[in-house]
Image (cartoon, rainbow, N blue to C red):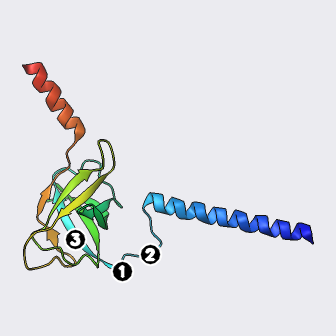
């Protein structure tokens, strides 16, 4: 009887450990078990998105208010179109807000930072953020610096 209790306790402990690992993996990867029902979709066009990827953060003043849903090319304008899911609680973004691609640290992940505007009309589901600033690509900056030094 004592052996059976020990086996059940070890099994329960192992099950708790496996569930903890699954939750940790979901948290680290940015995946969630909930759907995006509590959000609205906004798009923005960028000339260069650098290393931005789906599920990247969308922030306002450093606080996450959403995430990147998908990225594709606008074949007519030849620009990257980024679709973002913004939390429904962030209903205070005006239509003249701007979006820029930022990098966390020197070589960290890229994410979108929203700068709020001053318009009275707010962004709604399906709207586009017109004012955007593309990613700053470190390789381009280094090559400009090196080639300018060589030409002097």
Q: Which residue shows up at 12% across the image and 20% down it?
A: 150
SS of the residue at dot 3? Answer: strand
Answer whether labels 2 and 3 touch (C-beta < 8 Å): no
Residue 130 image point, x, y percent: 11, 65
Q: Which mark is residue 34?
A: 2
Check the image and report above or below for 39 versus 79. Answer: below
The mark that comes first in sequence, 2 or 3, is 2
Q: In this rendering, would 78 be left or right of 19?
A: left
**In the picture provided, is 26 more to the left or to the right than 45?**
right
Q: CA distance from mark 3 to mark 1?
A: 14 Å
Q: Classify 10 Å Cα crowding around label 2: few (below 14), some (14-19), many (20 and above).
A: few
Which residue is labeled 3 in the image? 42
Determine which quarter of the picture holds residue 127. Answer: bottom left
Q: Are marks 2 and 1 in contact (CB under 8 Å)?
A: yes
The quadrant holding residue 111 is bottom left
Determine the CA span between mark 2 and mark 1: 8 Å
Q: Which residue does the image show at 33% across and 55% down from the upper left?
A: 53
SS state under label 1? loop
Residue 74 sits in which quadrant? Answer: bottom left
Are there few (<14), some (14-19), or many (20+) residues within 10 Å of tag 3? some
- Residue 132: percent from the left, percent from the top? 13, 58
Q: Is residue 145 visible?
A: yes
Of helix, strand and loop, which one carries label 2? loop
Closer to us: 145 or 74: 145
Residue identifier under label 1: 37
Quadrant the N terminus occupies? bottom right
Mark 1 residue crowding within 10 angstroms, few (<14) / some (14–19) / many (20+): few
Place of residue 33 in the rendered image (x, y in percent of width and height, measured from the top left): 48, 72
Tell me the CA gap for discs 2 and 3: 19 Å
- Residue 75 seen in render: no
| Residue lying at 7% horizontally and 75% vertically, measured from the top left | 119
Residue drawn at 28 percent across, 60 percent down:
71
């Amino acid at each position: 009887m004592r052996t059976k209790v020990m086996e059940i306790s070890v099994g329960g402990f192992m099950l708790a450990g496996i569930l903890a690992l699954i939750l940790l993996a979901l948290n680290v990867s940015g995946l969630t078990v909930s759907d995006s029902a509590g959000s609205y979709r906004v798009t923005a066009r960028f000339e260069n998105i650098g290393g931005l990827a789906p599920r990247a953060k969308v922030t306002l003043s450093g606080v996450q208010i959403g995430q990147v849903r998908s990225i594709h090319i606008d074949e007519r304008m030849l620009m990257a179109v980024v679709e973002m899911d913004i939390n429904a609680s962030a209903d205070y973004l005006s239509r003249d807000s701007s979006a820029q691609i930022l990098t966390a640290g020197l070589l960290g992940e890229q994410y979108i930072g929203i700068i709020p505007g001053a318009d009275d009309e707010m962004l709604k589901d399906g709207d586009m953020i017109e004012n955007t600033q593309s990613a700053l690509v470190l390789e381009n900056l280094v090559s400009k610096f090196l080639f300018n030094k060589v030409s002097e």
